[in-house]
Image (cartoon, coloured by chain):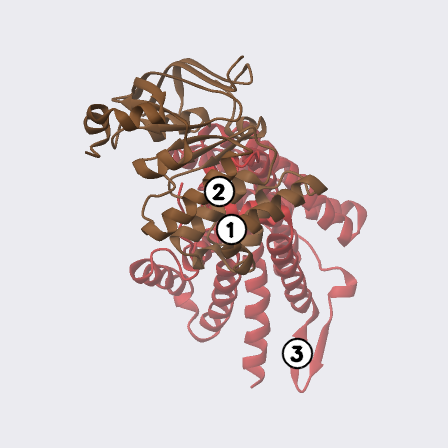
Amino acid sequence: MNPLLKVEDLVSYIGLYTILQGVSVEINQGEAVALLGRNGAGKTTLLKTIMGLVDTRSGLIKLDGESLVGKPTYGIAKLGIGYVPEDYGVFDQLTVEENIKIAMWKEDKPTLEKRDYVLDLFPDLKMAYKRLAKTLSGGQRQMLSISRALVNENKIILIDEPSKGLAPVIIERLAQALKEISKTTTILLVEQNFALACAVAERYYMIDEGKTVDDGTIEELKQNTELQRKHLGVI
Amino acid sequence: MDIFVTLLINGLAEGALIFLMASGLSIILGLMGVVNFTHGTLFLWGGYIFVWIFTFTNSFILGVLGAIIIVFALGAFFEKFFVSRVYGNVPAQILITLGLQVIFTDLVRLFWGATPITVARPSYLAGTWTIGGVTIVQYRIFLIVVGLLIALGIHKLLSKTKIGMVIRAGVQRPDMVQALGINIKLYFTLVFAAGAALAGLGGALYAPLVGSISSTAGLHNQVLAFIVVVIGGMGSFIGSAAGSLFLGLMGAAVAWYAPSLAVVANVTLMALVLAFKPDGLFGLAVKK
């Protein structure tokens, strides 16, 4: 089976600095995969490079067999990738409704059903529907960002550190929502919170100093305390 | 009281003209991060094209429409072939837009000559009304109405349409707009050309107000528009409207009570805003 998203020997740079120095990742349709590693390992840069927000120097990125390298960000998104950045990327001056509407490519029945689905998934957003996004809490902003990635028929969504800066009780709710989403959507999740990654993902890739250093199932990683200590500092 | 009403009308009319320049400039700066020094030239071209068409056809409406359409096309040309190549590079933007300003201002002199061209107001807007002893110039009321209609139109566009949503979102996070599958570059071209068209409209309406058009008119009005953008805050439509109104009213008052301070007053106001509120009175937090 061909992977849905394939990244091979990816090298990318920001300014004069090479951040990714040979990352390889494969994600199959329907999977939830966690991208783990310490701060500064290159996880966020990998997502940005996939989205075309950071330039690729060499290597390949393919979605459903189609190369993404050199394509503009909007073109990559249109191919079916939803992106949830670590700073949420919410438009503060727009209402919740407008933030969702701007992400909808169509206003047909399936898209409107998707919108209703995300509003049911995150009732907070339904209650704050007419409010400006700048009035939302951190957790609500995260929910809004994830909702935008879900309203279209995306093949995969890339989620960058959804638990960052959120209270434990909110992280718990988020984990439940992501678990629910993973039943119908392929997910590539960057996460420092090991518990959240374990709750959502089935497989993982470990990134260190811009390279893929390990991969396997989450169950295997749970048993491997040495790897957790070395790359995640969780023990 | 008579003077107060006259100054109010003069100030509002002047504010409406400045607003036509400043609103486009502000959104171009806010959305695209482009410091656009071609705006004065686009204003100038609007004025000359209007005078040219008006002289030939004797139709005020055709002259204004022609100015809007041609300057819109000129704006799209500037963006597509010059400005789009220097996004994110402010020094290059300043140099390239200043270069275009010099070239296209000289082209105006080449086509229409260096001496000012006189133009009359259309007969149906050339009169005055006298109400309670106050003489009201019809053309100034017309400018106020046009400014108001344009402001309402832009407000409606920005607040009620998807185009407006994208522009408002793009001012704050252009990268994220792209990541949602929207080709922001198309909007860049559209906004730049629309901003140019507004400047063109400003130039077209300015010429009959002062009774002539000369090749220095663009630069003078561009400076006023930049002051408004600084006062109002870049990317803020409300800021442009409020700043234009304030500058127009202040300009009319200063011109009456202390004409020698006309330029100083504008620049002092700008300096005060920069010193105490560098983002402008209605500025948005912009993340590029």
Residue B38: x percent and y percent? 51, 40
Q: Could you say which is closer to the camera, residue A93 or residue B167?
A: A93
Q: Could you say which is closer to the camera, residue A133 or residue A74?
A: A133
Name chain A's colour.
brown
Residue A81: x percent and y percent? 53, 30
Which marked residue is nearer to the observer: mark 2 or mark 3?
Answer: 2
Count numbered badges in the picture: 3
- Label 3 crowding class (10 Å Cα cut-off): few <14, some 14-19, many 20+? some
Against B212, residue B102 (above or below) is: above
Indicate the secondary structure of the residue bearing disc 2. Answer: helix
Residue B123: x percent and y percent? 78, 63
Judging by the rendered image, the residue that carries numbered circle 3 is B135
Q: Is there CB contact under 8 Å for labels 2 and 3? A: no
Q: Distance between the residues labelled 2 and 3?
A: 61 Å
| Chain letter behind tag 3 | B
Q: In which quadrant of the rendered image does the N terminus of chain B lie?
A: bottom right
Amino acid type, label 1: Phe
Judging by the rendered image, the residue that carries numbered circle 2 is A146
Snapshot quadrant of residue B185? top right
